[in-house]
Amino acid sequence: MPGWLEAGLWGLLGGAALVIGAAIAWFVRVPSRVVAGVMAFGAGVLISALAFDLAQEAADEGGLLTTALSFLVGALVYVAANAVLDRHGARHRKRSGGQQPSESQQGGSGAAIAIGALLDGIPESVVLGVGLLGGGGVSTAVVAAVFISNVPEGLSSVAGMKRAGRSAGYVFGVWGGIALVSALAAALGYLALGGASPQLIAGITALAAGAILTMVADTMIPEAFERTHVLTGLITTLGFLVAFTISRLGA
């Protein structure tokens, strides 16, 4: 199988998890505390993958300074893009309660939420595509982290969309489109960086990791804490340990 196609399929798998979460939220009434608990677990999973796979690998290949600077740039880029989207109604795109505005409350919020969801998913897809460039195959821990965390992301966001009166066409159009774009981003990441140096690949990996960590702090943890409160830390720790165990078993 061509490498670009394999990368695309891994990206599609990660995006498909969003659609699964969306379908659960649309057809099943999931208690808000359960949604928040799963979101906390997913946040812990992603944090573990960032620390023990992405950041560590980037530092080993590109050096600490390159990794640190790229990580910070990724965070700054995400914050800047997120700030623009927030002003157009996408601030609460991962919230399952009544925080998301309807189109009548804020015109253009539907498009902003869709773009925001895409913004959240692109760094993960790039990481999956770039991960194949070393020839050793994509990291099991990273794939597991993306998949496990994307289910609650889709679940929580769609619960909020449903409360805001979004249509089924909008909901599944957004998440189905993001799944396809995730596949495309992973494939393009592989093709564009096929001849890149290990240092450049490490920098891009760290940049994506910085954006992902910022996304976790900005959009996932607030939703989790609002409902699970004192249990948030414990559930996040469990997610961290699960991902860490997967990483060690796959080492």
Image (cartoon, rainbow, N blue to C red):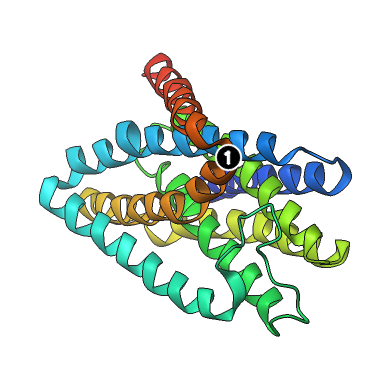
- Where on the picture, by quarter, is residue 72? bottom left
Question: Looking at numbered disc 1 in the image, what kind of residue is underneath it?
Answer: Met
Residue at the far bottom: name it: 107
Q: Give the tally of numbered discs.
A: 1
Q: Is residue 194 above or below residue 238?
A: below
Left or right position of 57 against 144:
left
Q: Is residue 103 above or below residue 64?
A: below
Residue 80, image x and y in percent?
A: 38, 73
Residue 206, image x and y in percent?
A: 29, 51
- Where on the picture, by quarter, is residue 152? top right
On the question of residue 143 being in view, the answer is no
**Residue that label 1 marks:** 39
Residue at the far top: name it: 249
Q: Which residue occupies the foreground of this view, 203 or 190?
A: 203
On the question of residue 41 being in view, the answer is yes
Left or right position of 140 against 194:
right
Residue density around tag 1, few if under 14, some if 14–19, many if 20 or more, within 10 Å: many
Q: Is residue 43 above or below residue 250?
A: below
Q: Residue visible at 70% across and 46% down?
A: 155
Q: Which residue occupies the foreground of this view, 73 or 40?
A: 40
Q: Residue visible at 45% across and 49% down?
A: 216
